[in-house]
Amino acid sequence: MRTLTILGLAVLRLLSRQPQHPYEVRQRLREEGLDHLIKVTHGALYHTFDVLTKAALIETVETTREGKRPERTVYAITDEGREVALERLRELLSTLQPEYPTYCAALAFMSLLPKEDAVAQLERRAVLLEASLASATAGSDALVKRGVAAIDIVEIRHLQAHLRADLDLTRAIVEDIHEGRLDWQPGERSTEEKADG
């Protein structure tokens, strides 16, 4: 099997609690707020169940049909599935994976825009970040009130930390532009870059 995807890991985690059918897994992902961290489409979820079944990481334990509804297949994690999930989780927690964030790339090219336009876009981003941070905080508070254990929502703390850092940096860049601390020559390379190029 290729490397276990994050969605695959999420499915194995939920099935390790109890056997479930894909619809239940999708509901649990929503209830726990994991759909904000993992892209979960109907097709991707069923494909993941198919891949995990073929790799013998999960197995069918029951198939039922109610009236004219389609069959519902209930899956359980296998012993091999538990081992693969634990191995992948250890790898993800202990190693650094290269990431290619689009915002970082956009910052690298920001000087293509006129200064005022760049400031306007960054200020718009700051508003969106504030809203996202407030939403994440409200979601976390709601999960805590529902009795979800802190260990099951620690990823929200990570998300909040990233949102705060992104917001702080975005505000600092806007301030640096306003204060003239960033040299602005839209679309032009510096004299040193021209000499090197």
Image (spheres, rainbow, N blue to C red):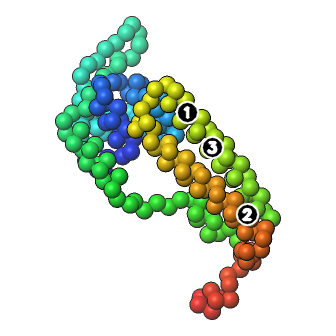
Amino acid type, residue under disc 2 in the picture: Val
Residue 132, numbered label: 3
Question: Up-down: is 83 above or below 174?
Answer: above
x and y percentages locating residue 180 in the rendered image: 77, 74
| Residue 52 visible, this angle | yes
Residue pushed farthest left?
79
In contact (CB < 8 Å): disc 3 and disc 2 = no
Q: CA distance from mark 3 to mark 2?
A: 19 Å
Sequence-wise first label, 3 or 2: 3
Which residue shows up at 49% across the image and 25% down it?
Answer: 146
Which residue shows up at 69% across the image and 65% down it?
Answer: 173
Question: Up-down: is 135 above or below 170?
Answer: above
Question: Up-down: is 145 above or below 172?
Answer: above
Sequence-wise first label, 2 or 1: 1
Helix, strand or loop status at disc 2:
helix
1 relative position to 123: left or right: left
Which residue shows up at 68% across the image and 89% down it?
Answer: 191
Question: Up-down: is 7 above or below 146?
Answer: below
Could you classify mark 1 by the number of other residues whose Cα lies within 10 Å: few (under 14), some (14-19), or many (20 or more)?
few
Q: CA distance from mark 3 to mark 1?
A: 14 Å
User: Which quadrant would residue 95 be assigned to in this image?
Assistant: bottom left
Residue 174, numbered label: 2
Amino acid type, residue under disc 3 in the picture: Ser
Helix, strand or loop status at disc 3:
helix
What quarter of the picture does the C terminus occupy?
A: bottom right
Q: Nearer the viewer, mark 2 or mark 1?
A: 1
Mark 1, residue position: 141
x and y percentages locating residue 115 in the rendered image: 78, 68
Q: CA distance from mark 2 to mark 1?
A: 31 Å
Amino acid type, residue under disc 1 in the picture: Asp
Which residue shows up at 52% across the image and 40% down it?
Answer: 36
